[in-house]
Amino acid sequence: MAQSFGLMLYYVLAHQYGVLQRRRLEHQKDATRIHERLGTPKERRPDAPLIWCHVKTKTQVDAFFETISRIREDGDELWFLLTSESADLDDFLKQHLPEQCFHLFLPLQAPQFIRPYLEHWKPDAVVWTENPSHPLILCEIAARKIPLILADANMPAAKPSLFHQLLRLDKSLYQKFEAILARDEETADWLKRQGIETDKIEIIGPMQEGTVALACNEVERARLAALLLTRPIWLAACCSENEEAIVIAAHKTAMRRAHRLLLIVVPERPERGSTLAQDFEAAGLNTCLRSGGEDPDENTQVYVADTEGEMGLWYRLAPTTFMGGTLEPNTKPGGASPYDPAALGSAILHGPELGPFADSYARLGEAGATEFVEDKTTLATAVETLLAPDKAAIMAHNAWAVSSGGSLVTGRIIELLTDVLDTPRAG
């Protein structure tokens, strides 16, 4: 009864707060997105299942991007609504939002704005992150019997406000979730002390980016592996034109220590393949071209892999990968995601230009999975160091461990969402 009265009082106060907030917003100079905050988004809701994901950090955004990519592999028509409250996240999402995704701010925390927001979007499921903030939104979602999943649950760093304690809101909000994915055992124990059913709680680790290993033609992998069986190999992936000369010089230097060293180069643009092969030949390196149907032999020093859709093959063959796009500013700063080679157990070399992948490189670096290079000299030195199988193996294992850890959480979210979408919802 006290909880019911507390919630009613909260609704009344929130309604009045919403009136004041609306007046404040209407007097702002930049009113281009007020409609989102007032619960009347301009975007049309697609006629397809829609998942609402609320994020708070860049790491969670990256993890949800991976979730979206993986859940779509089945080919289902599925849309996502990503909401946030941070201006920094808003800027990032504007530039990197996947297809069939919307990004909006949360509505003002008042029933007169939350209800039309939910009526418009009618989400089939909601994934919330960290802690059940915004009581009115969660109450309105639960009242509509929309499945709620709490991901990246973490024990609150501070006690709830006296106001929330008096209204007994915070503890009851956890009860509204069908599943709670806790970061650690400490969080799980704290949830149990709050009276949350044990079967709702899973200890699964922090929500972080990972990736599914890129596919490849296994017959072709085995064939090339047999051809290159005893040769040391390194890969320069998606190199920009500015980096090509650096890679040539680094390879020539590294070959002084290992004359049988083979470099596989994937140009940033496949059409650069034949020109790049000519540049390597002009530098005195025996080169063959993938698009020309040529195979590397014992005398080949550089293999230009200028075909599309085969990165999974090259990451599998090379125990060490230099990530192109990271040494020199170019049209695609940061190149490709470092989690692609990480998932396939390749040690990673990179420069300072990390683009949108700075957080990913930081996480891999902390785990001892990467090495920083800044020019042709340090790149050559790093390649030479990783010719030692034990050194490369340690870094490769660390890379794989980080990547697979992130995939565990996103995989569980996908399982829960799949169950939700496959289960008819009661009116």
Image (tube, grey):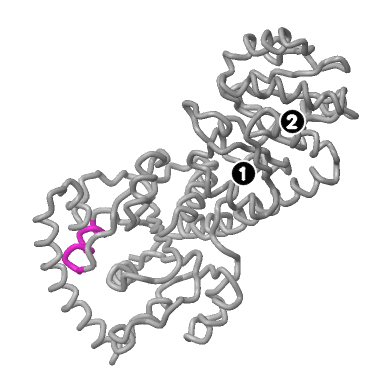
* Image-quadrant location for residue 238: top right
Task: Say left or right for 94 vs 110.
Answer: right
Observer-side mark, 2 or 1, equals 2
Relative to residue 143, is residue 41 depicted above or below?
above
The residue that appears at 62% across and 45% down in the rendered structure is 212
Q: Quadrant of the C terminus?
A: bottom left
* Image-quadrant location for residue 233: top right
Residue bearing the label numbered 1: 339
Other-residue count near label 1 (Cα within 10 Å), few / some / many at <14 / 14–19 / ≥20: many
- The one of 4 and 102 positioned closer to us in this rendering: 102
* Image-quadrant location for residue 137: bottom left
For residue 380, which numbered disc appears in the image?
A: 2
- The one of 148 and 88 positioned closer to us in this rendering: 88
Relative to residue 309, is residue 117 depicted above or below?
below
> Range of the magenta residues?
110-119
Q: N-terminal of the two: label 2 or label 1?
A: 1
The residue that appears at 55% across and 74% down in the rendered structure is 201
Q: Label 1 amino acid?
A: Tyr
Residue 173 x, y percent position in the rendering: 38, 77
